[in-house]
Image: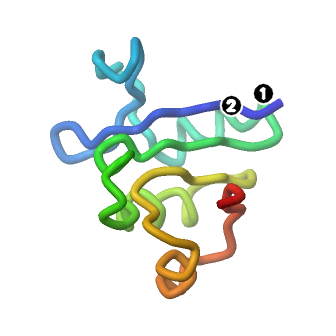
Amino acid sequence: MVLDLSCKKHNGEYHVATDRWQKISSLAVNEESLTKLGQSCAEFLVHGIDVEGKQSGIDEELVELLAEQSPIPVTYAGGVSSMVSCMLQELPVMHLPNA
């Protein structure tokens, strides 16, 4: 199973957003929450909603957090303008959606 997490920066940390990204939940995205949620799925699909649809570049801070703290594979979506620009980021190994 893949768990979809829409993430938005709020008060200096990332939180899961719900209801079409209109409500910011109290669930902070960090090592503790990723580890707990990771016990119930095989992969995370994470939307960086601060950059989603803008094609202005990925949310590097969120991607780094996920790469460092997620215990399971992550597919990231949000802000990617091209696969070339994404590859040039020299990101840690991640699973990227098909362009």
In the rendered view, tell whether residue 85 sits above or below residue 43: below
Asked if the residue at tag 2 contacts the one at tag 1, i.e. Cβ–Cβ closer than 8 Å, the answer is yes
- Give above or below for 71 relative to 22: below
Percent coordinates x, y for residue 93 in the rendering = 68, 74
Q: Is residue 58 left or right of residue 47?
A: left
Q: Is residue 75 left or right of residue 57?
A: right
Residue drawn 65% across and 52% down?
Answer: 75
Q: Residue at x 67, y 53 (%)?
A: 74
Between marks 1 and 2 in the image, the one whose residue lies nearer the viewer: 2
Amino acid type of disc 2? Leu
43 vs 29, nearest the viewer: 43
Between 73 and 52, the one lying in front of the other is 52
Mark before the other along the chain sequence, 1 or 2: 2
Which residue is labeled 2 in the image? 3
When the figure is inspected, residue 21 is found, relative to residue 67, above or below; the finding is: above
Percent across and percent down for residue 37 are: 66, 31
- The residue singled out by tag 1 in the image is 40
Instruction: Depth check: give the residue in front, 28 or 63.
Output: 63
Compared across the picture, whether 26 is left or right of 81 comes to: left
Residue at figure coordinates x 53%, y 51% from the top left? 77
Query: What's the distance in space between the residues labelled 1 and 2, CA to CA?
Result: 9 Å
